[in-house]
Image (cartoon, rainbow, N blue to C red):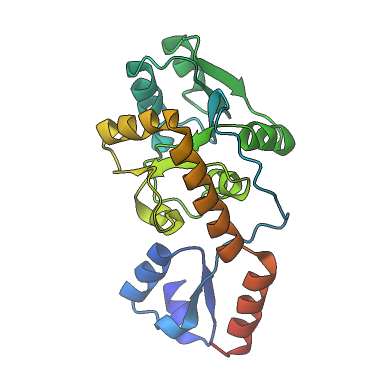
Amino acid sequence: LIKKIKKYNVKVILLNKIQRDNLVSKGIVSKKIKVLQNPLQDKTTNLYNPNSNYVVYAGRISKSKGVEELLRTWESLNINNLNIKIIGDGEIKNTLEKNYKKENIEFLGALDNHESAEYIKNSKAVITSTKMYEGQSKLITEAFSYGVPAIFPNYGSMKSLIPFGYQLSFIQFDYVDLSKKIKMLTDSDLLIKQSNIVYKFIVDHFDSDRIANKLDNFIEGNL
């Protein structure tokens, strides 16, 4: 594939700078490459409630997604009046359900998109401790589109989802830092500020019309 891209007059559209830098390091001319986010099609309204009593993880329940480390960290904090809801399925789901039988940890299984969205938009925050570079995290961008803050690692493509002034990302594989960010969920004033930051970020960067215009210009060779 690399050889074909080098040889022919083709353009490459990628989701993040990590992917772009990887191709450039392999000799792909940078002017052939454009980084464009997946747009969010539906217009949303920021109705964030910082007093919600739960946070959400939604996605594959696997070792690569760091779900066990997330639950281990959550359990160690002995958090009162705040639950974590785990949405999804995967190869370690049954094991985690057996090992983490706590009142404030709930496994909801696989849900359809509408059900998942309802849980996300009404949560205090979403959270992930993924170990992967990721492409463009649907969990985070969807949460941001509702004004819901997210706790996630400052790693790989996730770095591109950190707006200026955002305080809830943590150092990858540093679960002490993850603990600190979870504890910040008790500060309603801070959460409201973070909500406003992420919602503006989504409106400014993920608007479907704006991304479509950039795509047209790139294809037409104007960039």
Residue nearest the viewer, comparing 114 with 149? 149
Residue at point 61%, 35% (across, down): 120
Label tally: 0
| Residue at (36, 41) in percent of width and height | 131
Q: Is residue 208 left or right of residue 57?
A: right
Q: Nearer the viewer, residue 85 or 20?
A: 85
Left or right of 14? Residue 155 is left
Residue 215: x and y in percent read 62, 76
Instruction: Give above or below for 151 relative to 206.
Output: above
Q: Image point 54% across, 24% down: which residue? A: 54
Left or right: where does residue 208 sit relative to residue 103?
right
Residue 209 appears in the figure:
yes
Q: Please provide percent x and percent y for residue 60.
A: 52, 35
Counting from the top left corner in percent of width and height, residue 127 is at: 47, 35
Q: Vertically, is 13 above or below 138?
A: below
Task: Specify the quadrant of the image occupied by residue 209.
Answer: bottom right
Say above or below: 99 vs 215.
above
Q: Where is residue 200 shown, x and y percent of the image? A: 56, 57
